Image: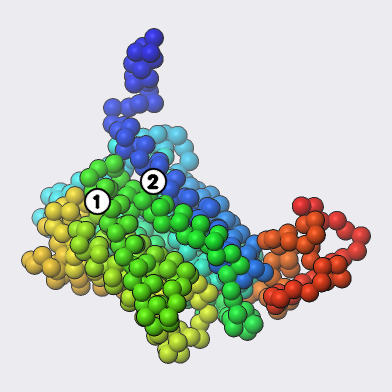
Amino acid sequence: MASTVSVAYNLSASVPDWLNKGDNAWQMIAATLVGLQSVPGLVILYGSVVKKKWAVNSAFMALYAFAAVVLCWVIWAYKMSFGDKLLPFWGKGGPALGQKYLLKQSALPATTHYHKDGTVETAMVTPFYPMATMVWFQCVFAAITVILLAGSLLGRMNIRAWMMFVPLWLTFCYTVGAFSLWGGGFLFHWGVMDYSGGYVIHLSSGIAGFTTAYWVGPRSTKDRERFPPNNVLLMLAGAGLLWLGWAGFNGGDPYAANTDSSMAVLNTNICAATSLLVWTWLDVIFFKKPSVIGAVQGMITGLVCITPAAGLVQGWAAIVMGILSGSVPWFTMMILHKRWTLLHHIDDTLGVFHTHAVAGYLGGILTGIFAEPELCSLFLPVTNSRGAVYGGSGGIQVLKQLAGGAFIIGWNAVVTSIICLVVRVVLPLRMPEEELLIGDDAVHGEEAYALWGDGEKYDSAKHGLYSDDTQHQMPSSGTTQVV
């Protein structure tokens, strides 16, 4: 009986000849791991690393962005990123909702790579699973990019402005980077290397976050002076989800459960561990104490730095990249930031510029130096690609990496500014002063922790004074809070 069921299942119309069940299973798992990086990973991390009065707002910015991206993605943004070519840097928008589209074999139609004489050099990307899997896998990448951007804006952006900003930025910024580098755009065909999003995700979110922080304006003076995390242990839990979820991030981007995927996952963990240790050592050497928040920053810069190179470099190169990702962003954040007026003037709440833009660009450049030819042949559309240390055309590759990163920086800085100016016509980008003073209670009517009595809101007449500097609204009479 069991054999009959097995045969019937394998002959079912839901198991076409082109389907590789192992690849499909891994890709769905990888997508789930990346999704877990955002919800609950960054929801927990953001809600814990900020001051207590901003815990709910920060976590909700991440949660809202995830949901908004999912809907926008399937209605129009997926095909703008991975569909038919409209412009050299953009695909034709359209819905990815019908079963005829979603159940056919996945394919990225603009990715066929040609020699100069017009003959095919590398065939179109056609993984052995349905389009529905590809749409969802790419969706969680888009979602985490917007959530990373939010890290620059915590503690003061008007939540209504954020709700308007998310679909605009996804449409006019993220889709351009994704199509240009992954979906068959001009940087893809030129041979710029971005294995899993060093440029598409991290450089773009770091630059866009920094740009948006400029237009939104700073947090309140009191918050900039004192902004302690409200729960370091929960912050570590969120960071842990981010770290282990990165296996789906980098391990899923060969679009198959293959040898290159295994190499990418191992390199990811090597680089992240090295970077965390280097950042911690630098904190001890220069500041005499190992900072837990600093260790998390080092972990993140390591993960970001290896992302464009994950399946393209050898293990020894992953260690070198970890050393540099633990030291270069440390220097820009801990030393340069305090001395460079521009960096100090713009209030980038979580230092996303350093942890994602600097680390992402650094990783892209190092990819051009260390990419190993045999590993490149397993992944890249341009044959005979190699890093500079392997001679040949490797020196040109570094220039390609610099130029590709410059395009992402320029596009995001300009278009993000335009988006902010458009939103500002409709809604103020920054919260009013009363909300900045009070925090979550004023913005959402909710607070993160029910610490007073039987879970009711804080009331100084009943609960006395406590030591933080959060301002609270006076409780209204005749109302009951439902918990």
Q: Quadrant of the N terminus?
A: top left
How packed mark 1 is, by other alpha carbons closer than 10 Å (few <14, some 14-19, many 20 or more), is: some
Camera-nearest residue between 7 and 122:
7
Residue 433 appearing in the image:
yes
Camera-nearest residue between 461 and 255:
461
Amino acid type of disc 2?
Ala
* Residue 30 numbered mark, or none: 2
Helix, strand or loop at mark 2: helix
Camera-nearest residue between 441 and 164:
441
Q: Quadrant of residue 225?
A: bottom right
Q: Residue at x 40, y 41 (%)?
A: 28
Label 2 or label 1, whichever lies nearer to me, is 1
Q: How is the image coloured?
A: rainbow
Q: Residue furthest front?
A: 288
* Residue 263 numbered mark, or none: 1
Q: Position of residue 377 (x, y in %)?
A: 16, 52
338 above or below 466? below
Q: Position of residue 176 (x, y in %)?
A: 38, 62
Q: Residue furthest right?
A: 478
Amino acid type of disc 1?
Met
* Residue 98 numbered mark, or none: none
Question: Which is nearer the N-term, disc 2 or disc 1?
Answer: 2
Q: Position of residue 258 (x, y in %)?
A: 25, 43
How packed mark 2 is, by other alpha carbons closer than 10 Å (few <14, some 14-19, many 20 or more), is: many
Q: Quadrant of residue 53?
A: bottom right
Helix, strand or loop at mark 1: helix
Q: Residue at x 47, y 37 (%)?
A: 98
Horizontal side, residue 44 vs residue 360: left or right: right
